[in-house]
């Protein structure tokens, strides 16, 4: 099997597991005043963009104050837009360490 195909299979497996690893509920988004769709899209972008290069960090490892700096550092490497970064941060902020 070629490398590209193996990578695609790994991404599919990772995405299928991500829902159970970092579950976001509607109650979480209401509590944090984030639209459910933005958080869901942010989670999908987080998994897809960040897992390309490294193991995903547990969103609860950092606070809402720490995450923006970390995501800013990675934005250029991951080639995400400012809008995608905002969506990722909307997800991370709902799961961040309090």
Image (cartoon, rainbow, N blue to C red):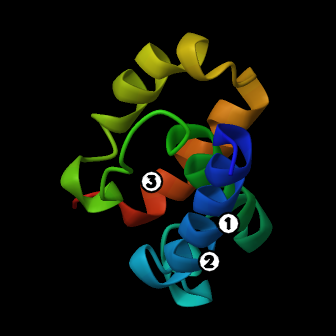
Of marks 2 and 3, which one's residue comes earlier in the chain?
A: 2
Residue shown at 73% from the left, 50% from the top: 5
Q: Is residue 68 above or below residue 31?
A: above
Of 14 and 74, the residue lying toward us: 14
Q: Nearer the viewer, mark 2 or mark 3?
A: 2
Q: Nearer the viewer, mark 1 or mark 3?
A: 1
Asked which quadrant contains residue 87, the reply is top right
In the displayed structure, does residue 52 sit left or right of residue 58?
A: right
Mark 1 touches mark 3? (CB < 8 Å) = no
In the displayed structure, does residue 95 sit left or right of residue 17?
A: left
Secondary element type, mark 1: helix
Residue holding disc 3: 93
In the displayed structure, does residue 73 sit left or right of residue 7?
A: left
* Residue 54 spot, x, y in % from top left: 39, 38
Tell me how far mark 2 sits from mark 1, CA to CA: 6 Å
Few, some or many residues within 10 Å of mark 3 (<14, 14–19, 20+): many
Few, some or many residues within 10 Å of mark 1 (<14, 14–19, 20+): few
Of marks 1 and 3, which one's residue comes earlier in the chain?
A: 1
Secondary element type, mark 2: helix
Q: Is residue 78 above or below residue 7?
A: above
Residue shown at 54% from the left, 88% from the top: 27
Which residue extends farthest top?
A: 76
Residue holding disc 1: 12
Mark 2 touches mark 1? (CB < 8 Å) = yes
Asked which quadrant contains residue 21, the reply is bottom left
Using the image, tell me which numbered label, if any, was put on residue 16: 2
Tell me how far mark 2 sits from mark 3, CA to CA: 22 Å
Tell me how far mark 1 sits from mark 3, CA to CA: 25 Å
Few, some or many residues within 10 Å of mark 2 (<14, 14–19, 20+): few
* Residue 95 spot, x, y in % from top left: 39, 64
């Amino acid at each position: 099997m070629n490398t590209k195909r193996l990578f695609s299979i790994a991404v599919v497996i990772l995405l299928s597991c991500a829902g159970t690893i970092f579950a976001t509920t509607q109650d979480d988004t209401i509590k944090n005043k984030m639209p459910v769709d933005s958080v869901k899209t942010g989670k999908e972008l987080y998994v897809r963009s960040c897992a390309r290069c490294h193991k995903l960090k547990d969103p609860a490892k950092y606070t809402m104050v720490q995450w923006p700096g970390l995501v800013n550092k990675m934005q250029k490497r991951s080639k995400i837009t400012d809008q995608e970064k905002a969506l990722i941060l909307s997800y991370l902020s709902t799961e961040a360490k309090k």
